[in-house]
Image (tube, helix red, strand yellow):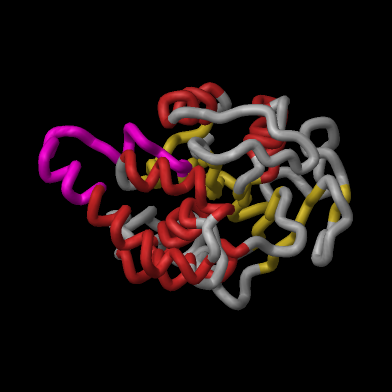
Amino acid sequence: MNANASSTSPYKPSLFSVLKEAVRGKAVSRTMTNLFWLGVEPISGNILDIGGGSRGSHYRFLPIKKEAAIKVADIISRPGTDFVLDIAKERVPLQDASQNAVFLFNILEHLNAHDTVLTEVKRLLKIGGRLYGSIPFLVNVHPDPADYVRFTGEALRELFTRNGFAVITIDPVGRGPFLAAYEQLDSLIPSVCHAVFLPLVWLADALVQRLRPKRDFPSIFTLAYNFIAEKRV
């Protein structure tokens, strides 16, 4: 299948899968964001990764076919960068409708000209091509080189729709209030200690969900969002 394949399976990361990454030093929110991509259909063809210099941890989870041709545009010259440019001000030197997929992983929060960037993404994508990405929400401010915004799921949907994309999915990454609070302390907790504390936090959120079963706690206490949007015209 190519980048036009169907979207995702239900996103229900297990404690074990999150804990395995956490004890290796990966932030809980980033781990849960990455695990989502295990449920996505294989991605192939021409792929432009915006801001993907040095290849983030999500590459270990994305189902990218071996024959895919990946180009990287980044504002800083990092390893593996093909085009050094400011995507909010400059065009990528690729032909119109030349890409099967565009990646925007943990980049939108660092941009202050979202409509301009999405116009460029739409120019580059083929009809039926898809935009894949993620953006943090209840996560600390992290300039790289700046950190401008946080979007709710509703704001993301409006942003993509306004710029002519069909939203395939906007998936809230989270579990409940205890994990949301735990995430704020993540950088202060030695990696090995996650093996003790994270199961307790996981259980606490499970009990809260049992007590209030009608509330959608992942959507209320969202750590991040994953999204897939498609160019149809």
Q: Is residue 169 visible?
A: no
Farthest-out residue, bottom:
66
**What percent of the width, then of the height, locates residue 144?**
76, 43
- Residue drawn at (52%, 65%) of the image: 62
Q: Image height check: is 187 above or below 96?
A: below
- Residue drawn at (50%, 36%) of the image: 137
Looking at the rendering, which quadrant does residue 91 occupy?
top right
How many numbered markers are drawn?
A: 0
Q: Is residue 172 left or right of residue 121?
A: left
Which image quadrant: the N terminus?
Answer: bottom left
Q: Is residue 220 left or right of residue 117?
A: left
Q: What stretch is highlighted in magenta?
A: 205-225
Q: Can residue 166 be seen in this view?
A: yes
31 or 178, nearer to the observer: 178
State yes or no: residue 150 in magenta.
no
34 or 7, nearer to the observer: 34
- Residue drawn at (77%, 48%) of the image: 95
**What percent of the width, then of the height, locates residue 90?**
85, 36
**What percent of the width, then of the height, locates residue 207?**
16, 48
Q: Is residue 6 left or right of residue 12?
A: right
Q: Image height check: is 126 above or below 21?
A: above
State yes or no: residue 213 in magenta.
yes
**What percent of the width, then of the height, locates residue 218?**
31, 41
- Residue drawn at (48%, 60%) of the image: 31
Q: Image height check: is 68 above or below 151?
A: below
Q: In this view, does 75 lie to the left or right of 141?
A: right
